[in-house]
Image: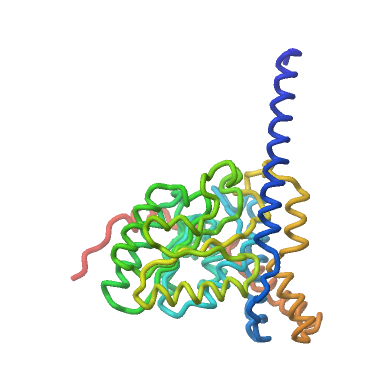
Amino acid sequence: MDAANEAGQGKSDQIKADQAQADSKTAGANSATAHAPAPNTPQFTREEDLHAYHEMLLIRRFEEKAGQLYGMGLIGGFCHLYIGQEAVVIGMQMASIAGDQVITGYRDHGHMLACGMDPKGVMAELTGRRGGYSRGKGGSMHMFSREKQFFGGHGIVGAQVSLGTGLGFADAYKKNGHVSLTYMGDGAANQGQVYESFNMAQLWKLPVVYVIENNRYAMGTSVARASAQTDFSKRGISFGIPGEQVDGMDVRTVREAAARAIDHARSGEGPYILEMQTYRYRGHSMSDPAKYRTKDEVSKMRDEHDPIEMVRKRLIEAHGVSEADLKATDAKVREAVSDAAEFATHDPEPDPAELWTDILLEARA
């Protein structure tokens, strides 16, 4: 490389570094506002905090193990981890009832576990084994469970929003009293089909709660640089859809807002938007070095707003749970995740004949 090119490259790198620092400052300021303690934060009972702690810890340990297996080359393709965002889906599930459907994008492992899907089946799908939920053919982004009312796992940005709206239409048509919990990220919130779905859902008063998991950076660009309207709870205003911003790092505030939104949808009032202000500790996917933000920003979020650590602290200080009991919970969760990894790395791969299955729906007699 000649001197001119070296100088140009150096300038380009400096511009990127300066932009990352500016984005981090913006995100940091927004985070400080979003995650400031609410004056009337709802309180959990001891049992509720214990439940939230176990469920969020299961997601955290599962994702950590998935990251390890990916690094070892045992998981192929894309792998998007949910570490840091656990309070969102657990709080939502704590407010839902059996029969409510869940559908999301490709950062989906946590949603599967929150719905009660077997960690062995989820991990086996990640490693492409026949014991996976899609028999090893779907991978990280494409697995489903009709039994647990989980409808994916979708790899196309924003595509699940139209499908989730369709689930809500089915609920309204059947009059079954269920609600579709349709998740998307802040990046997907700018897609065109999202607004077509909003219009249809409000026009027909469909029972859908749109959960926008705003983790600040979409695929790697700060929302301040990519979105003209950064308050995603207002994205439904033109359609008359109510919405609110929620501290997505506190499972208590998530559950409270979720209960309000789900009740609105279930009562026939139509859709509701929840912007969950959350944060992912890892990159967009395992291949993302996340150079668009500073290490200090990530460390600050971990130290001051970690959703699991907040519950752990409450359990000790407010509920009198011992360190030994919490360590026992962690050990139990780690054992379940280790069992899942063991199964996922030793279960046979799919038979080649599986290439010809699940292509056409067989007619019923």
Q: Residue at x 35, y 56 (%)?
A: 197
On the image, which quarter does residue 50 sit in?
Answer: bottom right
Q: Residue at x 70, y 20 (%)?
A: 8
Where is the C terminus found, in terms of image quarters? Answer: bottom left
Q: Is residue 312 left or right of residue 215?
A: right
Where is the N terminus found, in terms of image quarters? Answer: top right
Residue 349 is situated, as x and y percent measured from the top left of the image, at 50, 57
Residue 61 is situated, as x and y percent measured from the top left of the image, at 67, 66
- Residue 9 sits above or below residue 129 on the image: above
| Residue 227 can be seen, yes or no | yes
Q: Is residue 170 left or right of residue 28?
A: left
On the image, which quarter does residue 358 sit in?
Answer: bottom left
| Residue 135 can be seen, yes or no | no
Q: Nearer the viewer, residue 24 or 340?
A: 24
The colour scheme used here is rainbow
Residue 231 is situated, as x and y percent measured from the top left of the image, at 54, 54
Q: Residue at x 63, y 76 (%)?
A: 52
Residue 229 is situated, as x and y percent measured from the top left of the image, at 51, 49
Q: Residue at x 65, y 76 (%)?
A: 40
